[in-house]
Amino acid sequence: MHKPKEEFRERALVVGIVRPNQSRFLVNDYLDEIELLAETAGADVLERIVQKRNRIDPAFMIGRGKVEELALAAKYLDADLIIFDDDLSPAQVKNIENVCEIKILDRSGLILDIFAKHARTREARIQVELAQLKYLVSRLTRQWKHLSRQVGGIGVRGPGETQLEVDRRLIRKRIAVLEKSLEKISKQRSNRRKNRSDTFKAALVGYTNVGKSTILNALTNASALVEDQLFATLDATIRSAELADHRRILLIDTVGFIRKLPHHLVASFKSTLEEASDADMLLHVIDISNPNFREQMRTVESVLAELKIDDKPILKVFNKIDKLQDSSLIAKLKNDEQPCVFISAKRGIFLSDLRDQLHLFIERFSKTMEISLPVNEAEIISRLHDLGEILSIDYQDSQAIINFKTTTINADRVQRLIAEKNFHVIEL
Ligand SMILES: Nc1nc2c(ncn2[C@@H]2O[C@H](COP(=O)(O)OP(=O)(O)OP(=O)(O)O)[C@@H](O)[C@H]2O)c(=O)[nH]1
Ligand SMILES: [Mg+2]
């Protein structure tokens, strides 16, 4: 884990709950993850507290007695904050805070904080602020001012510090302003997309920290930010990669997913993720060396379904094979998870397999069509140049017979364009 030395690090306790149908083993994996999140946000985790519970306590989540123990541990260890792996209601936060007298953060709050810390571009900053404000509106009861020991730090970056005291009406106004700006950016983005719509596009999607940006860099000589941190990438980066026989493909790097991704974030990041929705195929990147990779795959699949982009052709890219202990796993996955490839992006192992598969997908998901139009339809012909490759044009009388090749997605656009004018198109 990358820890900048000059950064002031807070001291945190993390709390997880084992539910009746869960194993301690699994909850420990979840706590590994929340620990990584905490470290990424700038905290060192002093201790994990795990409690088995059949029923969630509505007032204190883990029960008053356990919260009192927690307060003692926090005092003894001189902690600055307590992080819960589960999301807390505003009342639970208040009650636990009253007993422990230090900052209490839940999973969503922590993830939002990391997004705030990593947002670089104007778009990412607006998206994060929007998500934070929406989260805040529902918990305006939270006031950390009365806590003697801390001001600022994790969980109160971004709008929290100043806006907490402002009333809901002002926050709603700000939300409306931000939503308008995002709409504008989203329009500009979709215009830019139109301008590069003739090349086959593959979006890198997957759980956070699996190596999406590393793959983008390995295939394109780009220098996207790669960090052993969660959510290093918040913006969609697009680069062109060369495959065999000079064929090109556009690769789109996207923000990573995580278990229980706060829904305000998914909503705010829709326009960034629209880049993925416009892709011709998805590369679902998986960290094969993570013991929890199957659950991570399911999380990603459900976010893709939520974004309604799970119907695209998907190539599973199992990355980090260099870290794998048990290579029999590869044989098993090869059998169960086709189409898939196994690579190490960092070490450059089997990248040619990935390139070959991309080539196959381009072939398989491209369409050739024959279009007949009057020769004077210059505007449509110029639009076709934007949307794909004109293989040949035959002139017969006043008709142009165009042999045209394009991606599956653009083929639908062309169909609509031609149908609007009642001209003729046949898919070959
Ligand atoms: N051992 C090993 N490490 C890798 C490999 N690929 C990436 N990594 C490391 O995994 C970490 C995360 O890589 P990124 O490329 O930033 O991952 P990402 O999916 O873009 O992550 P986010 O943008 O944070 O969601 C970095 O420390 C990389 O060096 C690999 O093939 N093998
Ligand atoms: Mg990344």
Image: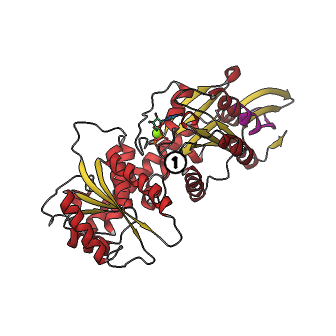
> Which residue is most to the right?
396
- Residue range highlighted in magenta: 359-378
Q: Quadrant of residue 58?
A: bottom left
Mark 1 C-beta to ligand 1 under 8 Å: yes
Q: Is residue 173 above or below residue 227?
A: below
Answer whether residue 51 is magenta in the image.
no
Q: From the viewer's perspective, is 293 left or right of 10?
A: right
Q: Is residue 424 above or below residue 298?
A: above
x, y percent for residue 315: 67, 42
Dot 1 crowding, Cα within 10 Å, few <14, some 14–19, many 20+: many
Answer whether residue 360 is magenta in the image.
yes
Q: From the viewer's perspective, is 428 left or right of 215?
A: right
Q: Nearer the viewer, residue 382 or 237?
A: 237
Quarter of the figure with the C terminus: top right
Q: Which residue is mark 1?
A: 207
| Residue at image location 28% in from the left, 69% down from the top | 168
Quarter of the figure with the N terminus: top left
Q: How many marks?
A: 1
| Residue at image location 81% in from the left, 42% down from the top | 425
x, y percent for residue 279: 61, 42
